[in-house]
Image (cartoon, grey):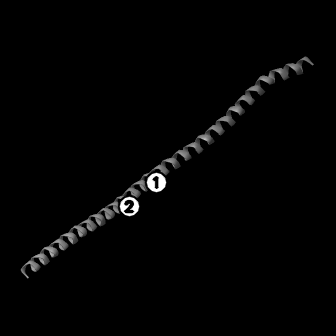
Amino acid sequence: MRRFFIRMRLAKEHVNWVFEKTWDFIMVRFRQEATLSIQRTFRGYVDRQSAQEDLKQLEEIKRELAINRNVTFIQKWIRGYLVRSRLDRLKEPLTISKVLLE
């Protein structure tokens, strides 16, 4: 009878040990999943913040390009006007001399 109780006690200790190890494994896995979830959330947050900063920079660059296009257009228009007015001034003496020659 004594052997029976000893075996029962040893079996109970063994079962308790197995349950403890299993519980520890489950808790470690649960903590790992929780840790991964927190890391995933934080990394997503950091990436979104970085993307927002990149978008702001792109908007600034887009505005600068639009301004540069407008400035280039105005410069092109003014240069054309100046060239045409110079050509008109160069042609004036020719027309005056034609009138005088006729």
- Percent x, y for residue 94? 83, 20
Secondary structure at numbered mark 2: helix
Q: Is residue 45 above or below residue 62?
A: below
Q: Is residue 51 left or right of residue 25?
A: right
Q: Is residue 43 left or right of residue 7?
A: right
* Image quadrant containing the C terminus: top right
User: Quick one: label 1, few (<14), some, or many (20+) residues within 10 Å?
Assistant: few
User: Quick one: label 2, few (<14), some, or many (20+) residues within 10 Å?
Assistant: few
- Percent x, y for residue 57? 48, 47
Q: Quadrant for residue 83, please give it.
A: top right
Mark 2, residue position: 41
The residue lying furthest to the left in this view is: 2
Mark 1, residue position: 52
- Could you tell me if the residues under marks 1 and 2 are in contact, i.e. CB atoms within 8 Å? no
Residue occupying image coordinates x 36% and y 62%: 37
Residue occupying image coordinates x 77% and y 23%: 90
Mark 1 vs mark 2: in front: 2
Residue occupying image coordinates x 16% and y 76%: 12
Q: CA distance from mark 1 to mark 2?
A: 17 Å
- Percent x, y for residue 41? 38, 61
Residue occupying image coordinates x 42% and y 52%: 50
Secondary structure at numbered mark 1: helix
Q: Nearer the viewer, residue 14 or 27?
A: 14
The residue lying furthest to the right in this view is: 102
Question: How many numbered marks does the figure carry?
Answer: 2
Say which amino acid is labelled 1.
Gln
Q: Nearer the viewer, residue 29 or 3?
A: 3
